[in-house]
């Protein structure tokens, strides 16, 4: 009886073929996702969500109650003025001013004194020089302004003490300017006043 014997060479070729088919092929390895691209995609989705939400809120704002009522039905600023005691600030009582004390009165359409929501810029100038010299400049946001409100039975104004940025010399009259920006109406109100100082 004749026995079929596979030659060693054939066995080696068969094994090589099997191993070749089962070995990893770089052309078929799936690429790993780029972390940067993933992050960009996530941020893009977040941005789109925020833009949609912003658009929704704008639509609600346009349809809000305020848009359907005239301004006169809302309490808003019609006038601002300096209080009569606005003057130089002499805290140590030595007869020499170290700054200015500002009393600011804000009135609504009915003439009542009110608090307001907005910002305030204050400047103090020496107009006797050529060119005029800025003595101090300050800006106040709503949270800061609330700290200066004097409300109560006998008080309904803002009180703001400001030391010099640059001490004035050889002058006894300075000009204080206030610029108030109201958030409700987006209007700006400006006033100025000359005050005497002691040196």
Image (cartoon, rainbow, N blue to C red):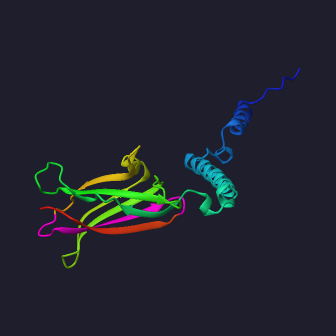
Report the residue that reaches farthest toward the right. Answer: 1
User: In the figure, 70 relative to 29: above or below?
Assistant: below
Report the residue that reaches farthest toward the front. Answer: 154
Left or right: residue 154 compared with residue 125: right
**How many discs appear?**
0
Which residue is pictured at 11% across the width and 55% down the height? 95
- When asked about the image quadrant of residue 85, the answer is bottom left
Q: Position of residue 180 (x, y in %)?
A: 42, 62
Report the residue that reaches farthest toward the top. Answer: 1
User: In the figure, 88 relative to 39: above or below?
Assistant: below
- When asked about the image quadrant of residue 193, the answer is bottom left
Q: Which residues are magenta?
A: 168-185
User: In the figure, 33 relative to 130: above or below?
Assistant: above
Please state which of residues 194 and 7 is positioned toward the viewer in this rendering.
Answer: 194
Q: Position of residue 50 (x, y in %)?
A: 62, 51
Which residue is pictured at 69% across the width and 60% down the height? 68
Q: Is residue 59 magenta?
A: no
Please state which of residues 107 and 47 is positioned toward the viewer in this rendering.
Answer: 107
Q: Is residue 176 magenta?
A: yes
**In which quadrant of the rendered image does the N terminus lie?**
top right
**In which quadrant of the rendered image does the C terminus lie?**
bottom left
Q: Position of residue 104 (x, y in %)?
A: 36, 58
Q: Position of residue 64 (x, y in %)?
A: 68, 55
Left or right: residue 101 compared with residue 10: left
């Amino acid at each position: 009886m004749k026995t079929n014997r596979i030659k060693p060479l054939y066995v080696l070729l068969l094994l090589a073929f099997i191993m070749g088919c089962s070995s990893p092929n770089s052309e078929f390895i799936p690429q790993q996702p780029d972390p940067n691209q993933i992050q960009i995609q996530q941020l893009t989705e977040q941005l789109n969500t925020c833009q949609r939400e912003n658009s929704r809120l704008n639509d609600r704002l346009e349809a809000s109650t305020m848009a359907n009522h005239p301004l006169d039905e809302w309490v808003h600023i019609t006038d601002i003025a300096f209080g009569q005691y606005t003057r130089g600030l002499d805290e140590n009582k030595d007869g020499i001013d170290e700054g200015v004390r500002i009393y600011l009165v804000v009135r609504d359409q009915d003439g009542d004194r009110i608090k307001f929501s907005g910002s305030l810029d204050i400047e103090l100038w020496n107009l006797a020089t050529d060119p005029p010299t800025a003595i101090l400049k300050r800006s106040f946001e709503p949270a800061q302004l609330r700290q200066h409100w004097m409300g109560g039975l006998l008080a309904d104004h803002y009180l703001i003490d400001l030391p010099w940025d640059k001490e004035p010399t050889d002058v006894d009259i300075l000009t204080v300017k206030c610029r108030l920006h109201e958030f409700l109406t987006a209007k700006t109100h400006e006033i100025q006043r000359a005050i005497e100082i002691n040196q």
